[in-house]
Image (cartoon, rainbow, N blue to C red):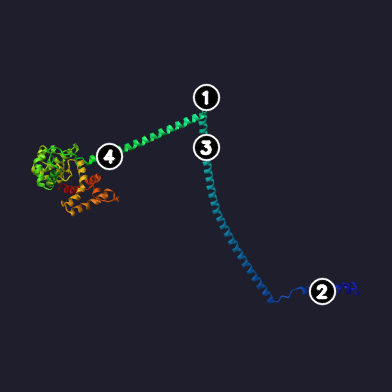
Amino acid sequence: MNKTDCKWHTAADSRKICLQTLLVGATAILTLSAPIVPADAKNEEKKQQQQQQKEQQKNDNQQRKQYQNADKQLRSNNQGDGRNHAQEKQREREANYQSALNQAQEKSRRQTEQANKHDAKARNNEFNQTLKQQKRDGRNSTWRDYKDREIQRERVNNQADARERQASIKRENERLEALNRANQQTKNRARNSNDYRRSYRPDKRWDYKLNNRERYQTYKRYHNNWNEQRSYLRSNLSRFNELADLNRQQQEQLDRQMRAAYLQYHNNQYNGSYSWNEYSDPRFIDYIQTKNPSLLQSILGFLGLGDGGDYLYSSNWSDERSELTQNIANIHQLALEGRITSAQESALLDQLRPEFMEYKNNNWNGSVGWSQYSDPNFIDYLNRKKPSILMTVRDFLIR
């Protein structure tokens, strides 16, 4: 219906009818526009809404985890950036230190160059002043002449310095040699002193008139026979100071030992005198041989009869070493002549070889034989370390 359909009615009816018509049309329109929602549709819609809420919540959780992971990664990157920053700082400090060092070196180099330039300038000024002075003095000197003189003067100074250095080195070497000689002489004196071997035999001792062969044979008889030693002591002990050769220290020490032994021999109840006349008592000699054999050996050693090594093949150790050096190689000839057996020679060689290697500090790669054993220093070594081997050598050579 439209507005033209209402024209033939009255105005009031028309208005009423038109109003009703409009209301019915509006109601119809509202009725048609409102959706028809059954009960199942509502439940389905509710489920969809719940499903949407769950998905929305799930998406929110995933997004939250992503944010958290991103935050962790950011913190980790910040830490790595911190380490990198520290390393960069360290490298920067090292670079600054190297730069400062280079600057210092460059500054030192420049200062050295300036000092050298200053010295060169000073020398040039000195040369120029010298030339001016020479010209003022009326001399016809040239720069070349002056330079040649300077070179000559420097050469002379260098030669003088070289001679002085050589003289200083020579003086130092001489001082060391003198010191070594003094030390060696001290060692020799100690080795040849009365504590080890006397350098000579006093006159009137038992062997002073005997030749080498007789002396050695008599020594062996005295050395190995107490009866012979006791007989000699009883006859000659009163002349001990005449026969022995002791220094002051040895004399004082021996006097103390003999006094103590003689007093003990008398049970510590002796008030008489102490002298070699009293010590010549045969019973006292037997007493010290039994009770104090070391003291007896000292007495025999001073008289050339004991184990103290005081006996010498010759009249002094220097001569003995010379004779042993010259004659030790003859032991092989003695074996060839049958004066000693081959076994005796082999046994002696077996004793000499290890001693020679030790004498060389086990650092000898050459041959070893009688020629090497004739070394005077090796004879000295045997005299100090293995006198028993030299006794065997003497036995063979004196036959």
| Residue highlighted by disc 4 | 183
In the picture, residue 296 is in which quadrant?
A: top left
Disc 1 residue type (three-letter): Lys
Mark 3, residue position: 113
- Which amino acid is tagged 3? Glu
Residue 144 visible to the viewer: yes
Q: Contact (CB < 8 A) between labels 3 and 4?
A: no
- What is the distance, in whole Å, between disc 3 and disc 2 at their CAs? 117 Å
Residue for badge 2: 25
Q: Which sits earlier in the primary sequence, circle 4 or circle 1?
A: 1
First in sequence: mark 2 vs mark 4: 2
Q: Check disc 2 and give the amino acid type.
A: Gly
Q: Which quarter of the rendering shows the N terminus?
A: bottom right
Residue name at image x 66 percent, y 72 percent: 48
In what element is the residue under mark 3? helix
Disc number for residue 326: none
Graded by Cα atoms within 10 Å as few (under 14), some (14 to 19) or many (20 or more), the crowding at tag 4 reads few
Callout 4: SS: helix
